[in-house]
Amino acid sequence: MESNKYRPANYTVGIVIAKSPNDVFNHLINLKKWWPEDFEGEDIKLNSEFVFSTGDSHYSKNKVVEFVLDKKLVWLVTESIRKTDNFQWTGTKMIFELMPKDANTLLKFTYDGVVFENEYDRLIQICDITVKEMFYNYIMYGKGK
């Protein structure tokens, strides 16, 4: 059986949303409504901790390390495991940056961490779906996960 090798991964996706930075930020921090995995933990603020999971096969513990109202949210993955293949992305940062753009807001999401060498394309798909579909549908149409 071929072993999976890790590679650094830094991928950014951006969307323009017809809302104010304040409105986008307030929706963004409501992770339990739109993030694709189950959310358990504190309200999102500086140093808050929370867990994402999918059944018993996918788990990550996270800590908010940057929280700038209406501008930036960053969390660090402090523990992680995908039991199906023992993939661990501990140390990865999830970075959300908001910038006014005319009467709209540019939301940029960056995954800054690791992936298996053969999963970079999958990472791009997951990031794009999470931001361009899941978050966008939540903020624009109230359709959470």
Image: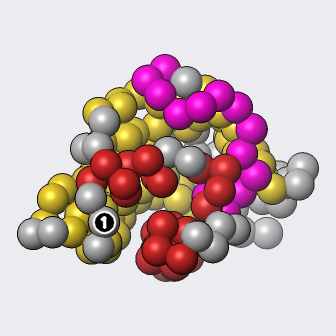
At label 1, counting other C-alpha atoms closer than 10 Å, the crowd grade (few under 14, some 14-19, many 20 or more) is some
Q: What is the quadrant of the N terminus in the image? A: bottom right
Image location of residue 126, percent across then percent down:
55, 72
The magenta region covers 35-47
Q: In the image shown, does 64 or 6 lie closer to the viewer?
A: 64
Relative horizontal placement of residue 31, taking residue 113 as reference (left or right): right
| Residue in front for this viewpoint, 20 or 84 | 20
Residue 47 location in percent, x, y?
49, 20
Q: Is residue 16 above or below residue 83?
A: below
Q: Is residue 103 magenta?
A: no
Q: Which residue is mark 1?
A: 19
The residue under the point 76% across, 52% down is 38
**Horizontal side of residue 144 vs 130, given as left or right:** right
Image color mode = secondary structure
For this orientation, the residue located farthest to the right is: 56
> Which quadrant of the figure contains the C terminus?
bottom right
Question: Does residue 89 appear anywhere in the picture?
Answer: yes
Q: Specify the quadrant of the image occupied by residue 138.
A: bottom right
Residue at 15% across, 69% down = 103
The answer to whether any part of residue 78 appears in the image is no
Residue 56 versus residue 47 in the image, above or below: below
Residue at horizontal 37 percent and vertical 54 percent from the top:
23
Drawn side of residue 21 relative to residue 36, left or right = left
Q: Main secondary structure of the magenta part?
A: loop
Above/below status of 129 relative to 25 = below
Q: Amino acid at mark 1?
A: Lys
SS of the residue at dot 1?
loop
Residues 115 and 103: in front is: 103
